[in-house]
Image: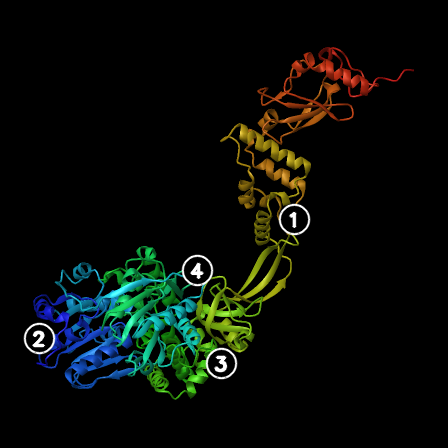
Amino acid sequence: MTKLPTLPVSAVLPALGDALSANGAAVLVAPPGAGKTTLAPLFLLDALLAGGDRILLVEPRRLAARAAARRMAEILGETVGETVGWRMRLDTNVSAKTRIEVVTEGVFTRMILSDPELSGVALVIFDEFHERSLDGDFGLALALDVQGALREDLRLLVMSATLDGARVARLLGEAPVIESEGRAFPVEVRYRDHAGTERIEDVMVAAIREALADETGSILAFLPGQREIQRTAERLDDRVPAGVVVAPLFGAMDGAAQDRAVRPAPRGERKVVLATSIAETSLTIDGVRVVIDSGLSRRPRFEPATGLSRLETVRVSQASAAQRAGRAGRTEPGIAVRLWRAEQTKALDAFDPPEILGTDLSGLVLDCVAWGVADPRDLNFLDPPPEGALNEARKLLGHLGALDAGGRLTATGEAMRGLPLVPRLARMVAAAPRDGRKTAARLAVLLTERGLGGTDADLSERLRRFAVDRSPRARAADQLARRIADMAGRAVSSLEDETAIAGEPGMLLALAFPDRVALRRGAPGAYVLANGRGGQLDPVEALARNRALVVAELQGAARAGRILSAAPLSDAALALLFERDGETEDVVTFDRGAKAVRARRVERLGSIVLSETPLPNPSGPDATAALMEGLAGLGLRALPLGKDGERLLRRLRFVARAQPGIWPDLSDEALRSGLSDWLAPFVPGAQALSDIDEGALREALHALVPGHLRSRLEELAPSHFEAPTGNRHPIRYDDEAPVLAIRVQELFGLKHHPAIADGRLPLTIELLSPAHRPIQITRDLPGFWAGSWADVRADLRGRYLKHEWPEDPANARPTARAKPRKA
């Protein structure tokens, strides 16, 4: 048995071995620096395994996987590929002697799906499980399923530094929880606040320069993503002392470049490592004693409404902040500088949310269907996948032809599953024509291995650069693309008759993203996608000159997301897509400018309108429906009611207010929403607002009143008042109290006040002079005669000498004329 180094985890390894032997599963919680990643697999290899059985150590990141394998090989006095090897995308280093395979989570998922019995594997260790990636959660769920149904002898170990061990233990069937002390040197946490208007790169550069001047040792600086790292590196150029090496570290770098970044600085030099969250766990960078934390990370967030995942810059959790700070105390006492205020730490989430709760689940659903589980929620997940995201995933897989209407795997879906790609890209390769299959595979690898072919938004340009790249990473990626193309060789293409067009990168990309075909619109660089979302390119980019694109990556708001990568689509390819997936529709709409109905023939691809052709003016029910919809948008004021129609509507609304529940609701909102019911039958054949006349409107309004109420309308709310002179005067129903405007002389002889609503509601009377000027408002005519009439009479006699102004108007003869002329 190999003598292992003594580290804090060494004290609990015997108990861990006993727990696994007795229960078949265990949880190991050990803080950073305890040695769990390297010592646990080596100890358990000798303590538990016999013969040629293997251990799979599942790591969330390639960088951590390589580092763990190298360290274990070093402890054994071997090189990687002997007892300890690794297996990851683009890189495999194992042999017949290998008994500990360090694999990435995605590779493990493919392994167990291909070989559910995990032949020759005795123990699976899930390391750094607190990162809660989708592949990690799914891999553990599959392993539990295998252990319960096929391999009772399979042992499972979940390890983490920051994890609710009891919760995971329940998932593993009340497995024992083994806890280890850590070995961490003290870390002094400092806070350095900054103005919200400052760019994080500028704040980081200032903090790094201060640390270089005031502290010793190398620096590990955490930034949210590749762009911020590159900008920080540019700002540090020529601004750091001699003997300081600036080393970026992010996922898009090839393995060799990542390894160079984490190696110790040469003697007499210091290193500034600019890293994403890739450096949070399972990794020790020798010589680092200062950590500077931006407090930010970039996390994918799936939007079910658009079917897109977008990267979102968010605040780190308290657990992540603790992990980052701990990097400073791995080899000696250190300092952690946090670029925020101390009190803000308590406001951070306790843990990062599991990826399964906010990502595209189409790959999970496809694999589960193939596994024989129609609903992924039937598997044992620590956090079940959301039902809404599962429904969106099923919808996408149906759109891609991977599932039939019953949710069963199709031949296309089976071909997609055979490829080590996410469903969209797998469909692109599986459905590509034979002549375009290699290009499709290279395009798929390009999209999954960030940084290949450069960072140009034009994927055609990146493909060209990829083809001439002779770096080790590019050669490994090209070999992977060849293998993927060969694996898809038996699939049947849907484009075999269109090889010339289908070989275009844009056309191939459309097989993966049919909902993201985009057409230029409006301002330069602006596009609308088939799914209805907007996309924006920098107008100066050559790609922005293309009429049509297929967008692979989009970031930002739905109205105008930033297009990160896309490929041009030729007119011929666009025509082919329309022939296959487009639709032609005769559309009847309301033209607000002309206030008339118009018809046009529209050719569209999803939400993209490819062409519009005017058609003769429409007629019939479609035209009437479009006219009613247009009127609803314009509002009732657009209707040519005329004076009589307005008066009728006001009278009807008056009685409806007076007797609620008896009369129909004739409010603006009710009339607008019901235009198709009350107005459309009275204007058959109308194509424009001008085709609706006042008479038809009045008839339509009358028809809204039930027959038994129509006779009551005149009784309750008469349209006119008949004066003692015999003249009819309209009653205004503008307000709650109806108003009658009338010359005072026409009311002479009237001893009671005019009223409506069966005599219950007195009219408000605007008394007018012979010149129709207001002289008094009253709701008590007899009181007016007996009271203020004398003063009004005196004024009127002086103004209107040719008219009779009796002292007792209640008993005088009404008149609408002046005094008769003398003969």
Residue 54 at what x, y percent from top left?
A: 15, 78
**At 14% from the left edge and 61% from the top edge, which residue is drawn?**
173
Residue 732 at what x, y percent from top left?
A: 65, 29
Is residue 786 visible in the rendered structure shown here?
A: yes
- Asked whether disc 2 touches disc 4, contact meaning CB atoms under 8 Å apart, the reply is no
Question: Which of disc 1 and disc 3 is earlier in sequence?
Answer: 3
Sort mark 2 into few (<14), some (14-19) or many (20+) by Cα contacts within 10 Å: some
Label 3, label 1: how far apart the Cα atoms are: 49 Å
Task: Kindly identify the amino acid type of the residue bearing the numbered disc 1.
Answer: Leu
Q: Which residue is mark 1?
A: 689
Where disc 3 sits, the SS reads helix
Is residue 122 visible in the rendered structure shown here?
A: no
Q: Which residue is mark 3?
A: 501
Question: Which of disc 2 and disc 3 is earlier in sequence?
Answer: 2
As displayed, is residue 77 above or below residue 405? Answer: below
Q: Nearer the viewer, residue 715 or 281?
A: 281
Label 3, label 2: how far apart the Cα atoms are: 60 Å
- Asked whether disc 4 touches disc 3, contact meaning CB atoms under 8 Å apart, the reply is no
Label 4, label 3: how far apart the Cα atoms are: 50 Å
Task: Kindly identify the amino acid type of the residue bearing the numbered disc 2.
Answer: Ala
Question: Which of disc 4 and disc 2 is earlier in sequence?
Answer: 2
- Left or right position of 756 against 816: left
Q: Which residue is mark 2?
A: 47
Label 2, label 1: how far apart the Cα atoms are: 89 Å
Q: Choose mark 4 or mark 3, whichever is in front.
A: 4
- As drawn, the residue found furthest toward the right would be 823
Residue 657 at what x, y percent from top left?
A: 54, 30
Label 1, label 4: how far apart the Cα atoms are: 55 Å
- Total of numbered circles in the picture? 4
Question: Which of disc 4 and disc 1 is earlier in sequence?
Answer: 4
Q: Which residue is mark 4?
A: 196
Q: Choose mark 2 or mark 4, whichever is in front.
A: 4
